[in-house]
Image (spheres, grey):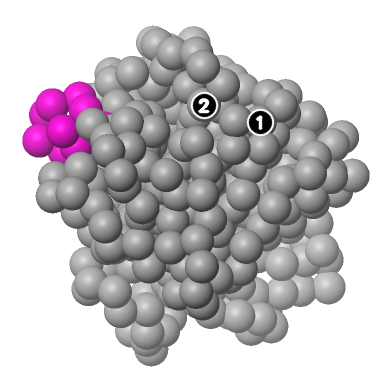
């Protein structure tokens, strides 16, 4: 069984690795693998977010991936021989105004109801954990079992694992999906084709733009721009992954062991524009400074913009479409890195002849709610 996967982001690469681990032959096609949304992502792995509060199926999927993540990265690091930068030293949410305090109270109740270990903190306790916090911090919530992963290291490890397990990487752009009653592979911009028994489309917000697709099989995946800032110091400026809530929005601050601090992210519906703007940079720095006043003394390292893939209902599309042997793995919106483990396992199960796992079934592309295919 030969699988063709279109898209070399974290979802496509993770799916390729798990399919190879099932004994399948795999070819990944992407002109610049691990270079877009996955490369820009901060890799925060919080216990939950507000998107899950009123969406029980998405909540189950997210928590299944959260449970799977430690073993997922441990297996990957063993196969690849590379670190993923995974850390489970806690995620600390801090509130800087009255609205944020109420938000954290709701989050604490949500976590307790779903068996997620969190601890409510006073302002003084927050500053004991992170002395650089602003005096305006009013309280916080610590999730000690959660943390972050470095998506750049994660995708590098996935590429190494794919190579070690005999997978093939084709660095070319797909122009068309080949469909002859069933999906048989793809046509390349550089000429020629890559054929296979099954084809998985994991090209993020470009998935629906591929040629050759019958109308309605792949819903429109909209791009949602996010600008992300990277700062640097000689050693870690912040001890643990932090989310600051202020003015009705959040800023996340993800430290790396090498002194990098990732600050993100903006949320902009501007089509396929990836321009880095002064306004986006000012917004990120302003929010970061509200949490960490000393952050403006750090060295500037990088600012980037990438496009999150949002489906019509902001839920992922995972599994078989109405076209035989054509599958989707896209539409993960803001939580692609968090959902890569459960998505890859689900696709690998289907590709190796099994059924879509129960947690992933509500996200089948043929779910019939107007967001999926078929």
Whole-percent x and y of residue 154? 69, 50
The answer to whether the residues at label 2 and label 1 have Cβ atoms under 8 Å apart is yes
* Residue designated by label 1: 24
Task: Give the number of callouts.
Answer: 2
Left/right placement of residue 35 relative to residue 71 reads left
Above/below status of 23 relative to 272: above
Whole-percent x and y of residue 253? 56, 57
Left/right placement of residue 350 relative to residue 267 reads right
Left/right placement of residue 139 relative to residue 17 reads left
* Residue designated by label 2: 351
Image quarter of the C terminus: top left
Q: Residue at 50% of width from left, 74% of height from top?
A: 191
Q: Residue at 48% of width from left, 53% of height from top?
A: 6
Residue 370 belongs to magenta span: yes
Above/below status of 339 relative to 81: above
Whole-percent x and y of residue 321? 28, 33
Q: Please identify the residue farthest to the left as the structure is shown.
A: 370
Q: Residue at 82% of width from left, 63% of height from top?
A: 258
The boundaries of the magenta stretch are 365-374
Q: Residue at 80% of width from left, 56% of height from top?
A: 257
Depth check, front residue: 358 or 28? 28
Residue 373 belongs to magenta span: yes
């Amino acid at each position: 069984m030969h699988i063709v996967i279109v898209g070399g982001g974290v979802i496509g690469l993770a799916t390729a690795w798990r399919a190879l681990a099932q004994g399948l032959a795999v070819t990944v096609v992407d002109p610049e693998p691990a270079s877009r949304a996955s490369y820009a992502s901060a890799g925060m792995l919080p216990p939950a977010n507000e998107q899950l509060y009123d969406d029980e199926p998405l909540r189950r999927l997210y928590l299944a991936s959260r449970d799977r993540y430690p073993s997922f990265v441990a297996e990957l690091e063993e196969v690849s021989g590379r670190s993923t930068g995974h850390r489970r030293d806690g995620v600390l949410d801090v509130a800087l105004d009255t609205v944020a305090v109420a938000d954290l109270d709701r989050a604490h109740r949500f976590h307790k109801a779903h068996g997620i270990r969190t601890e409510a903190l006073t302002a003084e306790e927050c500053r004991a954990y992170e002395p650089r916090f602003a005096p305006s911090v009013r309280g916080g919530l610590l999730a000690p079992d959660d943390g972050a992963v470095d998506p750049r290291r994660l995708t590098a490890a996935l590429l190494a694992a794919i190579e070690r397990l005999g997978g093939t990487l084709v660095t070319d752009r797909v122009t068309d999906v080949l469909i002859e009653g069933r999906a048989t592979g793809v046509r390349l911009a550089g000429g020629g084709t890559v054929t296979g028994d099954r084809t998985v489309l994991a090209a993020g917000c470009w998935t629906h733009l591929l040629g050759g697709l019958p109308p309605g099989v792949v819903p429109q995946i909209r791009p949602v721009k996010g600008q992300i800032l990277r700062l640097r110091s000689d050693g870690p400026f912040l001890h643990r992954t932090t989310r600051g809530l202020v003015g009705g929005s959040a800023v996340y601050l993800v430290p790396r062991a090498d002194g990098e601090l990732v600050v993100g992210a903006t949320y902009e519906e501007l089509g396929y524009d990836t321009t880095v703007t002064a306004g986006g940079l000012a917004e990120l720095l302003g929010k970061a400074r509200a949490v960490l006043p000393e952050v403006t003394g750090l060295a500037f390292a990088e600012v980037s913009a990438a496009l999150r893939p949002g489906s019509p209902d902001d839920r992922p599309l995972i599994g078989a479409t109405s076209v035989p042997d054509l599958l989707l793995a896209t539409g993960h919106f803001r939580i692609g890195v968090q959902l890569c483990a459960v998505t890859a396992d689900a696709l690998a199960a289907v590709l190796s002849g099994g059924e879509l796992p129960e947690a992933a079934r509500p996200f089948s592309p043929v779910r019939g709610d107007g967001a999926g295919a078929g």
